[in-house]
Image: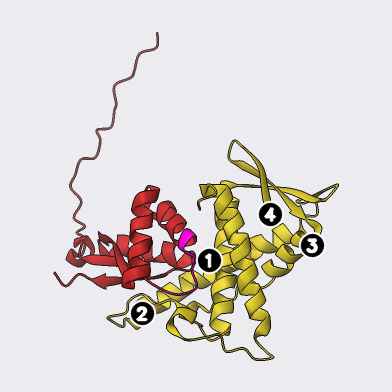
Chain colours: A yellow, B red
Amino acid sequence: MKLLRVDSDVFLFHLGKREKRLLLELLKHYPLTPTSHHRVSRNRTDPATQRLLQEALSTHRETYRRRLDMLLAQTDRFQADASGYRTQFNREELEWLLQVLNDIRVGSWLALGSPDPDDGKPAQLTAHNTRYLLTMELAGHFECDLLAALDGPAG
Amino acid sequence: MPQTAEPVVAPDLERSDQTQDRDALDPGYLVVCWNDPVNLMVYVTHVFQVVFGWNRPKAEHHMLQVHRQGKSVLSRETLERAEFYVHQLQKYGLQATMERDPA
């Protein structure tokens, strides 16, 4: 996913044909992170506040899921060119896509058993969850592309 | 040139009887971000910049604190503001919580 240019907060990207297919397939996985992954506090347990947080996160996800469905249904969002597709997003849409992609990345990581190679805890790969290794890495790849567009090559 | 008419109704300057809960005004809640091995460092830096409006050096400082020390205290806020920031950070998928400041 290559940034071609930025005009007045509108970011124009180029994607290869396979890259576009991968991105759209990846986005279908949203949401992947369970809301229970997030806690209000680590020191105190307040069930009412925790419940409110999870309700807020659930509502947020439903909104994002609907928005994502609309995006995936927009046939003119991706314009074919000689070597793939061109597509554009504004800054707010890129922030939204970042959140969606990171949810898929974190959810994939959880499905792999929360691996931490630096701490001697490799991924617990099974026939059932191996696909999450791919979704985790792909989501990270697209996140890096979007971050480079938003913040510059240094991230 | 049109003139401004005198107001016929005096503005309501009566003091509100409503009081806020003392706890809600107490800036004694810490917004904390915890380390995890999945969120990319560049992503965490970006999220801090967006959520708190920080410049990149400050955002990177806190990101590195999370990475090296396991957590970083990002802000000290009232209960309501702390909840707001924690929710914003969690929307981005970061491990953020609010903790009562023991000090």
Mark 4 falls within which chain?
Answer: A
- Looking at the image, is mark 1 or mark 4 earlier in the sequence? 4
- When the figure is inspected, residue A50 is found, relative to residue B66, above or below; the finding is below
Q: Which residue is mark 2?
A: A48
- Looking at the image, is mark 1 or mark 3 earlier in the sequence? 3
Mark 1 lies on a secondary structure that is: helix
Amino acid beneath label 2: Ala
Give the crowd class for mark 4: few <14, some 14-19, many >=20 residues within 10 Å.
some
Q: CA distance from mark 1 to mark 3?
A: 30 Å
Q: Closer to us: mark 2 or mark 1? A: 1
Q: CA distance from mark 2 to mark 1?
A: 18 Å
Segment colored magenta? B36-42
Residue A32 in sight: yes
Mark 2 falls within which chain?
Answer: A
- When the figure is inspected, residue B26 is found, relative to residue A42, above or below; the finding is above
Q: Which residue is mark 1?
A: A60
**Quadrant of the rendered structure where residue B76 is?**
bottom left
Residue B33 in sight: no
Mark 4 lies on a secondary structure that is: loop
The overriding secondary structure of the stretch rendered in magenta is loop
Q: Closer to us: mark 1 or mark 3? A: 3
Amino acid beneath label 4: Met
- Looking at the image, is mark 2 or mark 3 earlier in the sequence? 3
**Quadrant of the rendered structure where residue A132 is?**
bottom right
Amino acid beneath label 1: His
Q: Residue farthest to the right? A: A82
User: For the point 54% across and 74% down, which residue is it?
Assistant: A106
* Residue A123 pos. (x, y %): 56, 85
Which mark is on residue A1?
4
Give the crowd class for mark 1: few <14, some 14-19, many >=20 residues within 10 Å.
few
Q: Which residue is mark 3?
A: A18
